Amino acid sequence: MRRKSRVLRKIIRQYKLVNRARVPFDFLEKISKEQKVSINDLIFVLGVSKDSLYGLKKDRQKIAFLNLDKELAGIKETVHIIKIELKYLPRYGDRFYLRRELKYMCKKWDITINQFLEHTHPNPRHYQFNILVLKYNKKGFWVGEVTRLSNDFVIKIYDRLDRKCRQVAHIMCSHYNCYEHLEDFAGVALEKIIEIGGTVEKNFQFDEKLQLNILGVKGRFAIINYYHRYCKDIHYDRILLDNESSEDRLKFLSDDRYSPERMLDTSFSNDNKLLVSIKEDIHKKIVQEMSANLGMFETDRESALSSMADKLGLSREHLEKALDEIQDIALKIR
């Protein structure tokens, strides 16, 4: 039987929940609001599948199936439970945690502090950054909800942050060959960094250069998402204005030999605008799926990848190859 977190036990007791019960989405939202627990975290502790959450948000008349005895699937889910307890239980909450506090909580869940640091962020590359935080940040390691940059911090580093965003925007304009969007890209990066950069500000206050580099990466991902949402169709309309290019594109896509996996396996010059545009269509769909299911990726990356690969008609190998390509764009320089 699943070991239940204190957050889950409290909710079960207060709302008289039973395993395998079926409840409407409105009831879940009521619990979320009253307990001040995010809907994604609530869904996770109640054992509702991520696919069910996606369907519930699209159709509020659907019923959620509670799996209160669902076993935690490995270290990632255990770390997610620890973070939920740190966020919502009395005497914890959003704050800095010293190494001994994290070790104490990890020990209760039978994992090491290094396992916690390795899986506390969806991107495993952050492991080394997390080690630096615990080593050099005298206040400790911040755990909590996504927050904005503080006004004092923005005022202090605004000029450097603005230059970083313009540098990032220039790189992305060069990659996408759309310099007319330079100001838009710089503005999108700056706005997103201010909106979600609070954790980076708190955790990396011991190294301002590292702070700016990590914030810059967040800005790059914001630009990629913005481009695929608002700019790409306009950009490629310009490429395909002449009938010959448009006919070539339709002919290519209707060929029986065409498949997204084959495109991901194909190497070609960036000068071949037709093939570049088609490969970026694949990237666009992947980015859109990730944006729509961020909660799934934060709680169970493996299941989210498998689900997305099935939905897009790709193998896991090809999906991960495409994600690497997208990430290489975002991390083109440090």
Image (cartoon, rainbow, N blue to C red):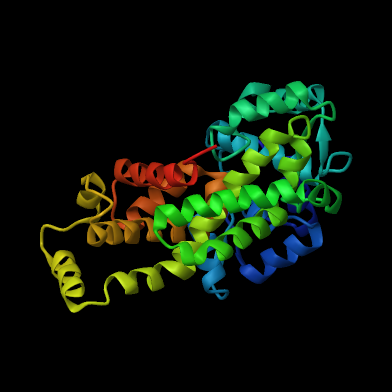
Q: Residue at x 64, y 29 (%)?
A: 129
In this rendering, is residue 302 above or below 171? above
* Left or right of residue 318: residue 221: right
Q: Residue at x 63, y 40 (%)?
A: 214
* Left or right of residue 102: residue 215: left
User: Residue 326, can we see it?
Assistant: yes
In the rendering, at what x and y percent does residue 276 appear? 28, 57
Q: Residue at x 75, y 47 (%)?
A: 198
In this rendering, is residue 35 above or below 297? below
Q: Quadrant of residue 245?
A: bottom left
Which residue is the extreme one toward the left?
A: 256
Of residues 8 and 245, which is closer to you in this image?
Answer: 245
Of residues 288 and 47, which is closer to you in this image?
Answer: 288
In the rendering, at what x and y percent does residue 316 appear? 33, 43
* Left or right of residue 180: residue 206: right
Of residues 58 and 258, which is closer to you in this image?
Answer: 258
Q: Quadrant of residue 18?
A: bottom right
Q: Residue at x 33, y 61 (%)?
A: 281
User: Residue 197, can we see it?
Assistant: no
